[in-house]
Image: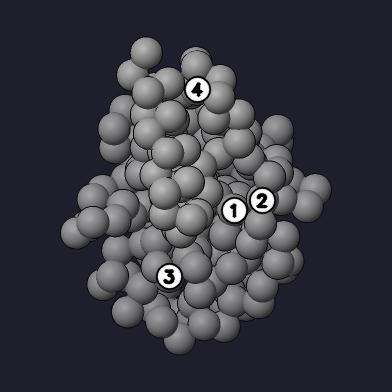
Amino acid sequence: MRVGRFAALLLALVLVAGCAGPAPQKKSTKAAEPAPPSAQLEAAAKFALALGAADGATLATLIPKESAAEHAAEIASIKMKSADSANPSRSWNGTVLVLKAGKSEYKVMSDTPTQATVSDGLGSMTLGLAQSGSSWLVTEVDGEPSVCSVLSLSPKGLACQANMEVIFVAHEMAKAEVTTVLTSVAQLKPKYLEKVPTCMSGGTYTLDPEKSVICTVHGARSGAW
Ligand SMILES: [Zn+2]
């Protein structure tokens, strides 16, 4: 078995080297050990953990560089929720990587080499991945730029979510009475919405039949995960 020989070789190397570098996973004597998770799956897992913990500093390293640079100040304003993500417990069966951090549990699996799905028991998100140099980055979350999900955790992003909630309610009321499809938030004025709220990050709002409300900076109303 290739894996068994690899494990034996690792063990031999560790013995020879006097245990330098990361120790191999335990159970290395087991012959049917699956190959480790791919680099992109690890990136997806890291992103999910950091998103759950509102760890802006880590998230900034996992999204495309230009996005992180453009929104550096807003990302820096994200208030971390917990430090649980630092040392999650892991289990890997060759297909699904299960991470437990505090009360959160994430199941991460690859759909394609550039797409992974993360579920947390409440819902799931689809991550688009791309290689950048020697590392993998999360470029999209549910079809939107990944930076939107990150920015939704900032104080401005949270305020924006509240704005979108107000617009959403107004849109729902309008839909009950108006037969035409509304696409502009301005169309909700003045009957359903007294004034259009302002996104503090300079985003503009549009109505979307599927995603209800979208901010150009913070993404869809349901984008927060
Ligand atoms: Zn916004």
Task: Assess disc 1: are there few (<14), some (14-19) or many (≥20) residues with their C-alpha within 10 Å of its C-alpha.
Answer: many
The answer to which quarter of the image holds residue 219 is bottom left
Residue 86 seen = yes
Task: Determine which residue is flagged by label 1.
Answer: 49
Which disc is residue 188 wearing? Answer: none
Relative to 142, is 146 above or below? Answer: below
Task: Determine which residue is flagged by label 2.
Answer: 88
Q: Nearer the viewer, mark 2 or mark 3?
A: 2
Q: Is mark 2 within 8 Å of ligand 1?
A: no
Q: Secondary structure at mark 1?
A: helix
Task: Name the amino acid type tagged 4.
Answer: Glu
Q: In which quadrant of the rendered image does the N terminus lie?
A: top left
Q: Secondary structure at mark 2?
A: loop
Which disc is residue 60 wearing? Answer: 3
Task: Determine which residue is flagged by label 4.
Answer: 33
Give the side of residue 55 with respect to residue 58, left or right: right
User: Would you say the residues marked 2 and 1 are in contact, meaning their CB atoms lie under 8 Å apart?
Assistant: yes
> Which percent across, then down, holds residue 52?
64, 55
Q: Nearer the viewer, residue 2 or 126?
A: 2
Q: Secondary structure at mark 3?
A: helix
Q: Nearer the viewer, mark 4 or mark 3?
A: 4
Could you tell which of marks 3 and 1 lies nearer the N-terminus? 1
Task: Name the amino acid type tagged 2.
Answer: Pro
